[in-house]
Image: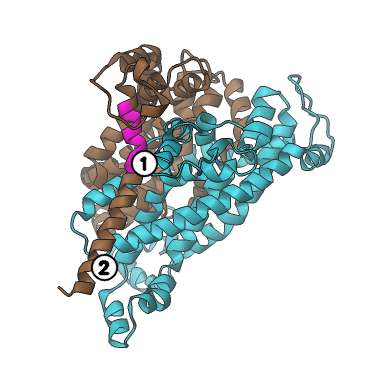
Amino acid sequence: MTLQRFWTRGAIYLVLAAFCAFYLMPFYVMIITSLKPYADVNVTRMWELPRGIYFDAIFQAWATVSPNFWNSVIITVPAALISSLIGSLNGYIFAKWRFRGADTLFILFLVGMFLPYQGILIPLVLTLQAVGLYATVVGLIMVHCIFGIPITALLFRSYYTGIPNELIDAAKIDGTGFFGIYRYILLPISMPAFAVVLLWQFTSIWNDYLIGLVVLSNPRLAPINVAVVNIAGSWTVEWNVQMAAALIAALPTIAVYLLLGKLFMRGLLAGALKG
Amino acid sequence: MATKSISAAGQRTLVSGSTTTGRRRRRISGDMLLAILVLLPSILAVAIFIYTAIGWTFYISTVKWNSQVIDYSFVGLRNWLRMIGDARFHADLRNLAYYAIGFMTQCILFGFLLASLLDQKIKGEALFRTIIIFPFAVSGIVTGVAWRWLMQPTTGINLLFANIGLDWFQPTWNTHPRYGMWAVTIATAWQFTGYVMALYLAGLRGIPQELREAAAIDGAGTYATYRWVIIPLLMPVTFTAIVLTGMNSIRVFDVLASMSGSGAAFATDTLAFFMFQSTFGAYRYSLGATIGAFMILLSAFLIVPYLRSMRGEVER
């Protein structure tokens, strides 16, 4: 290795390490602050490690936001499951039953993925009120499923497009029908796609704020991120408790990301239509 | 559907009778009807909750419904004129420009830089990658809470600055009456850069090694290779990144909700805030709908070219 190459490599690692420090910095502050007792949350000692580990702030935050945490669970889990199932069927149809106009319809679906929701919020509320689902958990689950239709169809469609048509044709010759092909040919090999879509939907529904705020603003029923804002908005709540609440809100998606990072990557890329 | 596959598919049709690719030669089969039937609920949902809703929003923007009492009497463009004349709207447009410039530049520049560095056969690449994308796994709300604390005038980053002798440099960050929006983009770019980095990394991995070698044989150095080979080849990725970060700029809401709100004198206000507060705070539904409709028009400049560019890709 020449000297110049040595310095170049060193500089690359140094820059990467500096960026990583930057990306980890807020997590560091969040974690150490939520482990400090209130007396230690001091503006001059912000960056110092706690003088011992105190779970007081975390317990206090948990006592406040735990109902909302569980709300988020009962909203996110069914919504992610149902929208993945819908997405899988839609993707199957868009990939393997390409009726006339199917591609145009698909593009029309995708518009929903990019739309600023502010442009459809008022009709959304009016529609939900009309069918009696406004301010209900079921209503919010339904809205997440509907807004998930574009992305889930896209992810499954690109996965199923990769499966040879010959396989489907052979099944048709054998007299297998629409559901038979889905059930016996595609579904058994769909697990990787389901993993990516479930992960993606879980993360985006869990992290949602706007839709939860609009559809389910009742503080008792609201999802976790709405509760965290309510805590952060009140200046009376101590910083360590605010940080702890934010940490609790972030924990499920962080855990999922660390456990299934590769799938997350795949979802990210497919989400940008490059899958 | 590519026309060149029709002849091959047609031949297969003769043999098997009903194939996936030869569908156009036959009448719609029962299974095809079933497929459309299964798709129907989704079509209806999209038609109602996306397209009808867009139309409805535009309609509400032309009526007089600016109180809790529903009023659908037509007022033409009055709401639009009122919005355009509103000082808050002007602040929002200025903030959108500030935000978009700051956010998009950081995401694309750092995203590209990090991807290029990670592409240099780095030891521990997976770890670096995991850390850089990490912030994207947390919500905008969590991001806002963490960065509000980091940007406190008397502590956080300013404390770090003071500790390294920069105690004359103590910006007020997101509370700055004029440039608060730039500070906000530090937080949002912190969250989003990993995503852009992942896009660029996938793009870089898609460039054949031979091209780089050919450039090297032609005597191109690292800079020339990037300037004349890699960056032009990555234009589609850059386009995607511009669209995604642009969309994010138009609708930014949640990071601000937990960070600085609208700020003093709307220093960090956004169209999304204006829309939300007009509608659900002040019950001025028609004004809210007008802002929402305006946001849709703005994003159409990004969505339409993007979907158009995708069309070819979809119809493979």
Quadrant showing the N terminus of chain B: bottom left
Q: Which of A2 and A96 is in front in this view?
A: A2
Mark 1 vs mark 2, foreground winner is: 2
Q: Is residue A100 above or below residue A256?
A: below
Dot 1 and dot 2 within a common chain = no
Kind of residue at disc 1: Pro
Residue identified by numbered label 1:
B135
Residue at left 43%, top 17%?
A: A238
Q: Find residue A4 and report its image quarter.
A: bottom left
Residue A154 in view of the camera: yes
Task: Say which residue appears at 66% left-offset and 23% top-offset.
Answer: B281
Residue A8: assigned label = 2
User: What secondary structure predominates along the stretch shown in magenta?
Assistant: helix
Q: Quadrant of residue B208?
A: bottom left
Q: Is there a contact, CB below 8 Å, between mark 1 and mark 2?
A: no
In terms of secondary structure, where does tag 2 sit?
helix
Question: Mark 2 falls within which chain?
Answer: A
Q: Which chain carries label 1?
A: B
The front one of B95 and A119 is B95
Q: The brown chain is which one?
A: A
Q: Is mark 1 on a helix, strand or loop?
A: helix
| In the displayed structure image, the side of residue A217 where residue B230 appears, left or right | left
The x, y position of residue B242, in whole percent, is 51, 57
Residue A18 forms part of the magenta stretch: no
Tell me which segment is drawn in magenta.
A23-32
Which chain's colour is cyan?
Answer: B
Mark yes or no: residue A177 visible. Answer: no
